[in-house]
Image (cartoon, helix red, strand yellow):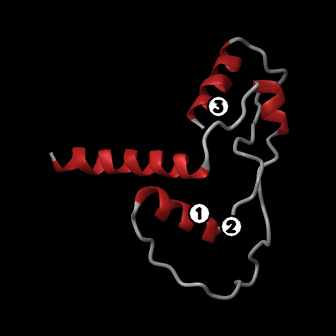
Amino acid sequence: MAKAHVVAIERLLQNKNTSNYEYFNVGTGSGVSVLEIIESFERSTGEKVPHKIVGRRAGDIEQIYADTSYSNRELGWKSEKSLDETLLSAWNWQVSIMTQEEK
């Protein structure tokens, strides 16, 4: 996602946008369940995530995912990393911050 932000900022600085603002959905374009995210995080980091499987709450949406076609077309950006790689990177960043705070 950081690369998508860089490309979007470059577009802004080059005045390629046609209005006062633009928004871009970035992601893979494929939905992932909460359980799939938990399993991916545990697999990639080796950390266990305590969780309970319960019924759906009133008002919970069934599915949602980003339509990335606009960002793919306008920014030339596509997701390059797997979910495992993304979660491991985010975890490593968080661990590095916690380590810096301990110093």
Amino acid, disc 2: Ser
Q: Quadrant of residue 49?
A: bottom left
Q: Which residue is mark 3?
A: 4
Q: Quadrant of residue 6?
A: top right
Q: At which x and y percent is residue 53?
A: 60, 84
Asked whether, in this view, residue 92 is left or right of residue 35, the answer is: left
Q: Which residue is mark 2?
A: 33
Which image quarter holds the C terminus? top left
Which image quarter holds the N terminus? top right
Residue at x-position 60% and y-position 41%: 81
Label whose residue precedes the other's in the sequence (2 or 3): 3
Measured in 3D between alpha carbons, the distance from the residue under mark 1 to the one under mark 3, in whole angstroms, is 21 Å
Q: At which x and y percent is residue 13?
A: 66, 14
Q: Which mark is residue 27?
A: none
Measured in 3D between alpha carbons, the distance from the residue under mark 1 to the one under mark 2, in whole angstroms, is 6 Å
Amino acid, disc 1: Ile
Residue at the left extreme?
103
Label 3: how many Cα within 10 Å (few below 14, some 14–19, many 20+): many
Q: Which mark is residue 37?
A: 1
Residue at x-position 70% and y-position 44%: 27
The answer to which of 25 and 46 lies nearer the viewer is: 46
